[in-house]
Image (cartoon, rainbow, N blue to C red):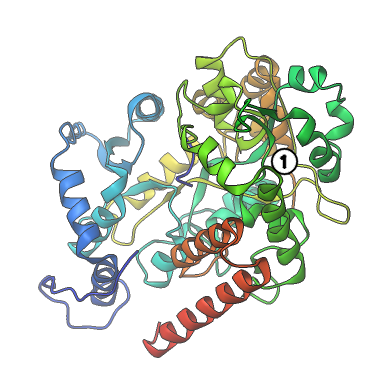
Amino acid sequence: MPAPWPGSSSSSSWPSPPGCSEPKRSGCTMISSAKALLGRIGLAAMFLFVVGFWTVPALKAKAAPKTRKQVRFWHMWTAEWKDVVDKIVARFNESQTEYQVVALSVPATGADSKFLLGVMGGDPPDVMAQWNPVIPVWADNGLITPLDDLMSPEEKRIFEEQAYPVVKKVGKYKDKLYGMSIGINMSALYYLPDDFKRAGIDPNVALKSLEGLDAAAPKLDRLEKDGGIKRVGWMPKGFAAFAQIFGGGLYDSKAEKVTLDTEPNRHALQYLVDSRKRLGYDKVVRFESGLNTASFAAGWPFMGGAYSVTVDGQWRVEQLRKYAPNLKYLTAPVPPPKGGRTHSGMSGGNFMIVPRGAKESRGAWDFIKFWSGLTNPERAAEFYTMGGWLPLTPAIANAKAYRDYIKKYPQFKTFVDLMDSTTVDVLPPVPYQTFLNDEISKMEDSAVRGTLSPNVALAGLEQKVQAELTRRRSLGE
C-alpha cells in the first residue's frame, strides 16, 4: 500500500492524569507534548477524527487469551490490505505462546489524533504501523521509543550492516532508530513498449537518459482532431524526486540543513515547467481532469493507455496483475539528465513505531522483528510478497519466496534494484516535515501553472521555510 507515504495553532485544555507534577519526559512532559500537538492539529482535524473514528463500525479487536500477554497493534490498512495484515498477525500468534497480537484497523483520517489521545490518556497501543511523516515531531516530543532501546547488540549489528540505505533513512532521526520498515515505497518508470514500437523508437535507447526520453515524448503523444490531448507520451511530475535526480535535493545530511533554493533544484523545477509547456498547461489540466490518477483499482490511467510512460510506485505491479493481467508493460529507473544522478529519487514507506508508555514493548519488538524479517529473512520474505512490499535487507530479497515472486513478476525487479542506491532520499528529517511537504507542493503548482517563475517560486519557498523556523524558535520549539 502506498504511503499517502498538522495544522493550525489552538490551545488544548485536556486534563492531566493524577500525579503529574514532576517534569519528566516519560510522564507529564510527554503528556504535555501530546496536548500541544493535539492543539496544533486544530478543531477541524479533531472533528474529522471524531466523525471518522466513532462512526466507523467493526473497530473492536478480539481479546487475547488469558494465558498470553496482549500486544495491541494499530494500523491504517483496510479492505484487501487489512486481510494481508490479519494473516501476518495470525502467523505471529501461531509462531509462539508468550504474546497475542490484537490488531485494530484505525481510519487513516483520525489515526494520528487517536494515537496522541492514547498517549495523553496513558493508554497507547503497544505498536503502530505508520506511513505519515511523524517520526521527527513525535520523537522530539518524547512520544515514541527509540527501537535501539529494545534491540539486542546482535540485532543492532544486523540492522546497521544489512539494512538497505533508504531503510535507515526512513526510520532514523538524530542517529536513533524510531521506525522499522515493513515495506519501502520506490518509484520508477512504467512504459508501454508497443507505443514505442509504433512510434519507431527503441526504448532501450530512449530511456538511457532524460534527454532521450524527452526527445521521444512528442512522437508518443496522441492528439484529438480538435487539438485536445488523447495520450501523453511523457509528463514528469514531482519536484522533490527530480531535485534529487538533477543532482540537488531537499536536505544536506552532513550540514543537517534543508536545501531548497539551489542551482540543481532550480534546473529541476525549470524542467518540470518546460515539460508542461510542451503541450500547454491548460490542455494538460483538461486532459488530467478526466483521469483518476489516484485509483488503486482498474481506473489507473496508465492501464487505459492515457500515458505511454509514467512514474509510479512498485504497488502498481500488484494492481496491474489484478486488473490488467494482459497489459504488456515494462519498468525502468527514471533516467538522469546529463550530469545528474542515476538510480535516484525520493522514497518513503510503511514502518513500525513503539509509543512511550507501551505496556508490552518487548512483545511489540518481537512482532516487529517477525514481520520485518530482521532476524528471519526467509520467513518474512513471504509476508513482503503478500503485500507487494519492498524488503528490509538483501537477505529477504534473496530468499526463495521473494525470488519466486520476482521471477513471476519481473517488472518488480526494477524497484528492488533501486533499494541499493545511496542517492534515493526521503523527506528531510525535521520536525516541520508536514509543513515543508505542503509548501513544496504549493510552490511546484505555482511554478508549473506559470503563476511564478521557477526562480521566484523557489526563493519564496526558502523565505517561507525560514519564517517558519523563526516562528518555531520564538515558541521554543
| Quarter residue 259 falls in | bottom right
| Quarter residue 145 falls in | bottom left
Image position of 45 with respect to 378: above or below: below
Tally of marks = 1
Q: Which of 271 and 399 is in front in this view?
A: 271
Residue 229 visible in rendering: yes
Q: In this view, does 264 lie to the left or right of 239?
A: right
Q: Which of 212 and 220 is in front in this view?
A: 220
- Give amino acid for label 1: Leu
Residue 143 position in % (x across, y down): 34, 65
Q: Nearer the viewer, residue 54 or 71?
A: 54
Q: Nearer the viewer, residue 291 or 354?
A: 291
Q: Mark 1 points at which residue?
A: 418
Residue 100 position in % (x across, y down): 29, 34
Q: Is mark 1 on a helix, strand or loop?
A: helix
Residue 219 position in % (x across, y down): 79, 30
Q: Is residue 201 left or right of residue 318?
A: right
In the image, farthest residue toward the bottom = 474
Image position of 89 with respect to 323: above or below: below
The C terminus, quarter of image: bottom left
In the image, farthest residue toward the front = 226
Other-residue count near label 1 (Cα within 10 Å), few / some / many at <14 / 14–19 / ≥20: many
> Residue at (61%, 20%) from the top-left corner?
401
Residue 236 position in % (x across, y down): 67, 45
